[in-house]
Image (tube, rainbow, N blue to C red):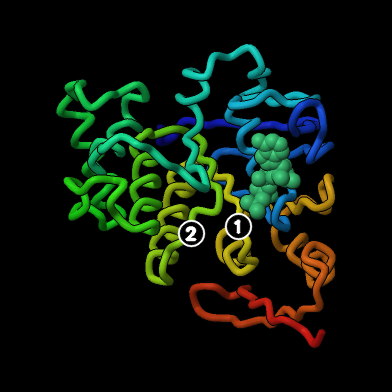
Amino acid sequence: MEGIKVKLDLNEVAVGYKGIAVLKDVSFTLNTGEVLCILGPNGSGKTTLFKTIMKLKPPLSGVISIDGCDISKWPYDKIATYIGYIPQNYSTVFPYTALEMVLMGRTPGLSIWSVPKAEDIQIALDSMKALSILHLKDKIFTKISGGERQLVLIARAIAQQTKLLIMDEPTNNLDFGNQVLILNQIKKLSQKGIAVIMATHVPEHAFLYADKVLMVKDGYVLAYGKSKEILSEENLKKLYGVNLKLMPVASECYPSFKVCIPGVV
Ligand SMILES: Nc1ncnc2c1ncn2[C@@H]1O[C@H](COP(=O)(O)OP(=O)(O)OP(=O)(O)O)[C@@H](O)[C@H]1O
């Protein structure tokens, strides 16, 4: 997918359940190579928005388009060729190995009885190697730790080789080292031309890796735009409803990095 451009547009999209919106008037554009971080309190509709973009549920209103085409008539299989999705919680009752889980990124309908192609196996192994989890390949997915499962799901999305990746809190459950590994991997993918949407509860992750930021709260978009403009003390205070301070901590690698410090209550 390297070198192929993609553009995702949301135009006044409302998402929710049984006709009741949890998030309204969402508009944004995401281009090849950009990382969009979505920040918002618990229950503000981030996962519901992702499921709607993935066509796992229909939007209540508005238009979602890829490369200018309204995707409302696209079958799910076609969406899966464009977008890889790493859900927040994934469970399976089947005793798949970690490698079989990653292979599912190559063949969405793969069952444990299917025989995958050698090329697909190689791509799956390469994705696992990039995340330093090759040693997990023969382990049963349900019997590895939550963080290891998260890494396997990320490897699966990488193996899918889509132009867009949606990651719902990808660093959830991960130790600090693996958080850095995953975030660096996300940056590398975006540098290769993949567009990434990532929900996070850690403002610092947005400071480090986001080109654009969408803040959602109380059913609406609170702010959207270039990360440098949107990640302000004022917006973060409004978003989380707490007092906080942004402290610049410049380093060679991250000249404009800031940390979010809780203020006096
Ligand atoms: N299947 C469902 N049916 C009805 N309401 C739901 C359903 N799933 C989620 N909701 C509600 O929709 C709202 C948004 O939930 P969602 O999971 O999208 O939020 P979120 O921003 O991803 O939250 P978090 O940061 O805690 O993961 C919440 O009020 C939630 O209770």
Amino acid type for the residue under numbered disc 1 = Thr
Q: Position of residue 21 (x, y in %)?
A: 81, 35
- Of the two numbered discs 1 and 2 on the same chain, state the one appearing first in sequence: 2
Dot 2 crowding, Cα within 10 Å, few <14, some 14–19, many 20+: many
Residue 115: image quadrant is top left
From mark 1 to mark 2, how far is it between C-alphas?
Answer: 8 Å
Give 25 or 187, whichever is nearer the viewer.
25
Query: Residue placed at 62% from the left, 25% from the top?
Result: 66
Q: Residue furthest bottom?
A: 264
SS label for mark 2? loop
Dot 1 crowding, Cα within 10 Å, few <14, some 14–19, many 20+: many
The residue wearing badge 1 is: 200
Q: Is residue 139 above or below residue 238?
A: above
Give 79 or 97, whichever is nearer the viewer.
97
Q: Is mark 2 within 8 Å of ligand 1?
A: no
Residue 92 in view: yes
Q: Position of residue 217 (x, y in %)?
A: 80, 53
Q: Is residue 4 left or right of residue 110?
A: right
SS label for mark 1? loop
Query: Residue placed at 68% from the left, 76% from the top?
Result: 260
Ligand 1 image-quadrant field:
top right
Q: Is residue 46 left or right of residue 152?
A: right
Amino acid type for the residue under numbered disc 2 = Thr
Residue 46 in view: no
Give 211 or 239, whichever is nearer the viewer.
239
Give 2 or 56, whichever is nearer the viewer.
56
Marks 1 and 2 close (CB-CB < 8 Å):
yes
